[in-house]
Amino acid sequence: MRGFDGLRLGERGGATRALDPGRGLLLLPLLVVASWLAGSVPAMAQEPVRTEPVVVTATRIEEKVSEQASSVSVVTSEEMDAISPVVAGDALKNVPGIVVQRSGSPGSPETIRIRGGRSEHTLVLIDGFPVNSPTLGEFDIGSITLRDFERVEIVRGAQSALYGSNAMAGVVNFIPKRGGGKPMVGLGLSGGSFSTLRWGISGQDGGKRGDFYLGANGMRSDGLTVNDDASLVSVLGSGDVPVGAGNRLHLLLFSTGLEKGTPHDFNTAGDTNDRETRRSFLAGARWESQVSDAVSLLASGYLFDEYFHVKDPDDPTDTFPGAFDDVTKTRKINLRLEARVSPSRASTTFVGAEFSKDRSSEHDPLNFLSLAAQTYNRSLFLQEELHIGSHSGASLGARLDRNSEAGTVFSPRAGAYHDFGGTGVRVRAAAGRGFRVPTISNKFFPFFGNPNLTSEHSWTYEGGVDGTFLGKRLAVSATYFFQDYRDLITFDLDTFRNRNAKKAFSRGVETEANVRILPSADVGVTYTFTDTWDPERGTRLPGVPAHRGSASLLLHPAPGLNGRIDWIAESDQIDAPLFSGRKRRSGYSRLDLSTRYLWSVRGSEIREIALTGTIRNLLNRPYEERIDIPAPGINFLLGAELSI
């Protein structure tokens, strides 16, 4: 295997307008002292009891992670609270097998790649509802704040047997908070480098009438340089309402609004007037009826609208003169019917049908651009979940899609696991087929569109072993994967046009280990090796680092007091340059520090107070996640949260 080529382990420096290194380091003793003082207060919250996560994304039914044949990771609300993420990508950096890439400062475009696949091969769900753009094929997670979400589930490997198009490499599901319990109001405020301000307010309630949650969050920042400012607001509401005997209705509303300057585009390295506006709105509902102890019926539907406006007037700094006033509008509509039969824990069968319609348009009168298209998809699916005894299980599924662009596509998937009882060792294996329909931009966008593109397909295979040892103080996991692509849509760096590669592959190994070294200290390590190849061009696939790893030290010296140090490293990758002509983005490493103190207040209307502090890129190393776009230097965020 190639080494960490290009890792700049000895470089120092910072991006424009970053926090001065000396001032940033002075925050460290202040945070430590504040945490120690907080730890001396007698009334403190107790550490939560750690239980094995239950996930729904891998099989669409609630099952433990240890009962999955697929590779599954969960980022819990406790883990998100510990690092105070500004936007979603901050919480996913330590997950094996995935690469999260942000084009600059928070609020900039941010996408997820899984196991060497493109970002369009990652299906993003919000509460189980797909939100990938019909125009771009991907979803920008840079517009999601995580305060209103309970957890994030990541399933690696092709999942088209369950979810259809776009789930070629995996699925990421953002699960919102559901409310319930006693009425509660939460308030949060934090600020830091680049004049960053983050705020949030939420409320929840629960009872016989149902469980409800409503939250609103915002973030604003001046960014790293001129015209890099961002202003983001999101609102999320969810409810679970019992209706009669054996019926339940789940509702979701989610809306975001982002105003962002773009200082780096394909035309210039310092654009002062390129602005973008992004708005999205998601409304979804699920109805579940328990017909009998063994039979349940489910119906769901959702509507997802996106609006994206890029306005870039002529600028003297433009390498090539030209103005843009591009407006993109998309709409996704989906209806789904499903029946589940579960006569015993040993078997759960579900069968159903789904209809979806995607509509998109793009107009730029300054460049005589006018595109519009819509696609329909009808599908039938069958899934069987088996539990063989208390130590083994299998998952078998298939989906038949009839797409207006791709024709008829059959997507099977099979997986199995076995737990060697008493040894702490579990083995698993899975294989499946995935596909993706080319978008309107893939085919017709000026400069790089190719109207002759066909749908892309993949077969994925994986095998893994998990183990717990030393009285469950040590947990290790390793997975080998192979993704065989056919007609892969790639961006040709020589012709600067999309094309179908006849054949390409991605293969590698994901490893993860967590060990409790002391009663108050844990260490976590992840490493992913990804080998990609495009035989036609004789190069690696763009946008995929061969090596990626992380190491984390988690400290919890007193009840309610937690801290962590995270080191993230990534090797070089081939990338599409904006303006420099470079085709290789150098590797990098980054060190982050986070601390959180949760104080339970007795005899007061205020139930809990949380004090948080985060320093990212502690060593102030210059780096890029995407080529030609500098990432932030050392920066900090300090905040407080109240629960009433």
Image: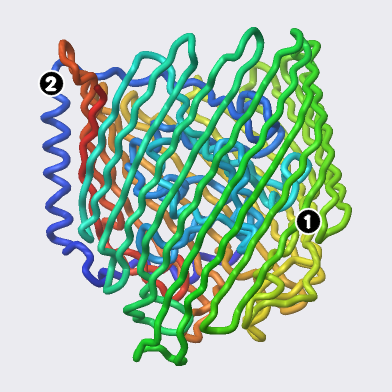
Q: Residues within 10 Å of mark 1 (few under 14, many from 20)?
A: many
Check disc 1 and report the residue beneath it.
458
Amino acid identity at mark 1: Ser
In-image side of 50 versus 86 (left or right) = right
Q: Which residue occupies 19% across, 62% down? A: 19
State the image coordinates of residue 606 (x, y, percent, origin top left). Answer: 19, 20
Identify which residue is drawn at 65% across, 85% down.
494
In the image, 546 versus 604, the foreground residue is 604
Classify 181 as above or below 459.
Answer: above
- Quick check: 605 left or right of 171? left
Q: Secondary structure at mark 1?
A: strand
* Quadrant of image for the C terminus: top left
Expressed as whole percent of the image width and height from the top left, the position of residue 521 reads: 33, 31
Q: Are marks 1 and 2 in contact (CB under 8 Å)?
A: no
Asked whether residue 116 is in view, the answer is: no
Q: Nearer the viewer, residue 490 or 130?
A: 130
Task: Kindly state the secondary structure of the residue where label 2 is placed.
Answer: loop
Residue 62: x %, y % from top left? 63, 24
Mark found first going from the N terminus, 1 or 2: 2
Q: Position of residue 402 (x, y in %)?
A: 85, 50
User: Label 1, label 2: how many angstroms apart (C-alpha)?
Assistant: 56 Å
Q: In the rendered view, would you say 405 is above or below 345?
A: below
- Residue drawn at x 44%, y 37% as measured from the top left: 236
Q: Residue at x 73, y 77 (%)?
A: 450
Q: Amino acid at mark 2?
A: Val
Residue carrying label 2: 41
- Quadrant in the picture for residue 186: top left
Residue 275 visible within the image: yes
